[in-house]
Amino acid sequence: MDKYVVGLDIGGTNMRGALLDGDEEQVDELKIPSEANLGIERLIDNLADFIDKIRGDKKIYGVGLGIPGIIDSTRGVITAAPNIKGVHNYPIRDVLREKLDGDIKLVIENDANMVGLGEWRKGAGKDVNSMIMMTIGTGLGGGLILNGQLWSGAHGMGGEIGHMTINSEGPRCKCGNYGCLETYASANAIRRMVSEAISNGSISTALGDRAKAARPGEIPELVMEAALSGDETALGIWQEVGKALGIAIASLQNLLDVDMVVLGGGIANAWDLFIRTAEDEAAIRGFDAPMEKLKIEKSVLGDDAGILGAGYLALQK
Ligand SMILES: [Zn+2]
């Protein structure tokens, strides 16, 4: 049977997506600007365009949308999304349904949940039942797959692993709380640690000079390179990242006892610089039995995970 779905990942700059057939095989892919900074109406127009272009003359059964922000997936509402201008409690599912002709099922989820689903379905977690996904980029997004199902919470807003408190007296998070995981494990966290090391004079001269000359976006890569060449400050920063991840993993594993934790996103590329610390910290804090059975793996799908997850969810619903 020809049953096609679209899996879409909406970013602040671009939207990327794929047309999948009923066997979850990718038939086509597309990337166009999202223009999310120009407001939600423009974004909706672009979404409708995207779906029209990618479907061609094929009949679409459903569309899955991964959206950066706090998403009420049950009601199909974007509760808040800092990267999309002018959005607050926005009923995107209903608005988009009006725009698209035909009987198309629309499912929306937080983008990190879609990444978790994709990685579980087709990536590192494809042989396990229960999995925790952490996407470590600018911030830290989480996704929970429990017993083969995405757990998005009683109100569709669960899995916000990045905002677990790691240190009640830690740095202020953009969510308003203090000491959230993403204030220790994210690109923003690394930038914070570098500026603190510069202001209290504890940074090595070599790294300090390069960091002061760099653009903010370049800092994580710089700290990666410096650590690989043995810079003590840089190595210390990755240990902080690893320690925070380990604390979070131990708490999550004590709570959920899953088969696997998958770490993805740009920051996970520094894998060798933080993973030992993370595993050691998790082993110290977590209960022995579930920790010994837990696998901690790097994501294998990269940017495609969110698209495949969104398509899979659309096929399921
Ligand atoms: Zn937070």
Image: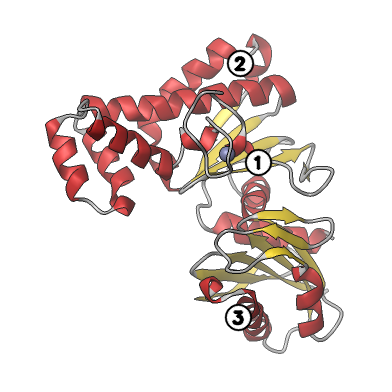
Decide if residue 24 is in sight here.
no
**Contact, mark 2 vs mark 1 (Cβ under 8 Å):** no
At horizontal 58% and vertical 40% (from top left) the residue drawn is 176
| Residue 83, above or below 32 | above
Q: Quadrant of ligand 1?
A: top right
Task: Say what secondary structure mark 1 lies in.
Answer: loop
Residue that label 2 marks: 292
Decide if residue 132 is in sight here.
yes
Label ID, residue 42: 3
Residues 205 and 177: in front is 177
Please state the total of marks drawn on the protein image.
Answer: 3
Task: Say what secondary structure mark 2 lies in.
Answer: helix
| Residue 145, above or below 18 | above
Residue that label 1 marks: 160
Residue 230 image offset from top left, x and y in percent? 20, 28
Sequence-wise, which precedes: disc 2 or disc 3? 3
Cα–Cα gap, marks 2 and 3: 49 Å
Mark 2 or 1: the one toward you: 1
Type of amino acid under label 1: Glu
Type of amino acid under label 2: Glu
